[in-house]
Image (tube, grey):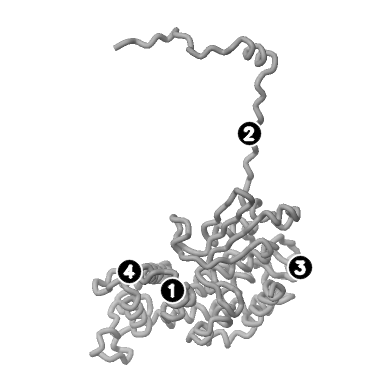
Amino acid sequence: MAVPNKNRKSWVQVPESIKYVFDKFPLYTNPPAPVPQSVRADLNTAAALDPADKAARKLNLHVYNVDATDGLATDPGSIEIQGLLCLKNLADQARTTVVSSHSAPTDVQRLPYLVDKRGTKSVIYKSPQSIRANLLLPPVGATPVYTNLVSTSLQDWWTITVIMDSHLREVVFGEGQYRSPIVPGVVENFLKDEWTQMIIEELRPRYPAVIDALVANNSIVKTSSKIYSLVRSQIYVASTDNGADANDSSNIVMFFRTTEQGQNILAEIRARAREALEVFTTLIKNSDKGFLGVGLGNRETIKHEDVTDAGLGSLDILLFSYVYRMSKGVSTIVNSEFTTLLADFPEVLGHSERVYSSLFSQSE
């Protein structure tokens, strides 16, 4: 094998005239462009943009479905983002588009997601978490505690509400008559199965044994109707000791006895939701202007960028997204069993009305 000649000269011959120019005028290299410290500023500075820049910018929020009566999304997660865009003065640049969850980024496959387009450049915020992180300042004080209270107790309440009513789920997620004939039947069935599994998994952090039993049950045929039937029977009936018909096998749920997770998941979730609403009732009563801000409390002297002059902040919008959708708009939600609980909390309902009036009534 031939040994490479290390002394071999390059075959490229630079003309003397070119060498002379670069010897006299060395090539200038621009310093590296500074990397933004936070992508958050890129999304959050829209209110300070020049009018020309605002006109060239487009925000597109992709959601499951929109309620025709109020123009808001049908799920709390998307309503929250709509509210945050209003809070940050981005509503004029934003539009809401109903899409299939299969249009979402492949590593998420959930809605909503936000596309921030400026000219030929686009940034995709793949989840509500990434949108919040880029819109809001880091949480302070007791904010994470109150946020977690909504994201667990009220989220579980919402999840069970959707699981219990197949028609409601069609409205929320844009299934069946709310999307066909755009989506072929075979695709529609596939989407229903995926969404059913997704909704059920929402309960896993708090009720792992229940969800494991659902998934592991060999009798489950993964179709929407079968899963609905199984989930409903397991929610409502703990065992034959509760008065269920022993001859009706669909009403016998043995694993509730052995998991020690409570005899009735429905009652447990309802109790947790009531406790959360009691906490927020106290916070609302103690606020000076009827808003929660970001959880600092109106008696604090801290000025916060993510709070309006009236005291409305991100925590108000998060609570509103659940309470409003369960009390307004979609008739099936308003008439559901769980929403009757809200009647016991007039302060929370009044808070929801104030948030809606502050953020959305002006745009109607």
Residue drawn 47% across and 76% down? Answer: 178
Q: Is residue 293 left or right of residue 342?
A: right
Give the residue number, with chain letter if any, for mark 4: 212
Choose mark 2 or mark 1, whichever is in front: 1
Q: Quadrant of residue 300?
A: bottom right
Q: Residue furthest front?
A: 181
Q: Nearer the viewer, mark 1 or mark 4?
A: 1
| 294 and 231: which is toward the camera | 231
The residue singled out by tag 1 in the image is 180
* Left or right of residue 65, residue 186 in this image: left
The crowd level at tag 4 (other Cα within 10 Å; few <14, some 14-19, many 20+) is: few
| Callout 2 secondary element | loop
Spatial separation of the CA atoms under disc 2 and disc 3: 40 Å
Residue drawn 44% across and 81% down? 167
Q: Earlier in the sequence, mark 2 or mark 1?
A: 2
Quarter of the rendering occupied by the N terminus: top left
Q: Name the amino acid, label 3.
A: Asp
Residue lying farthest to the top in this orientation: 7
What is the CA distance from the residue labelled 2 to the residue labelled 4? 52 Å
The secondary element bearing badge 4 is classed as helix
Direction from residue 330 to residue 185 in the image, left or right: left
Amino acid type at image mark 2? Pro
Q: Which residue is mark 2?
A: 32
Whether residue 156 is visible here, answered yes or no, is: no
User: Could you tell me if the residues under marks 2 and 1 are in contact, i.e. CB atoms within 8 Å?
Assistant: no
Whichever of labels 3 and 1 marks the residue nearer the N terminus, that label is 1
Residue 259 at what x, y percent from top left? 32, 74
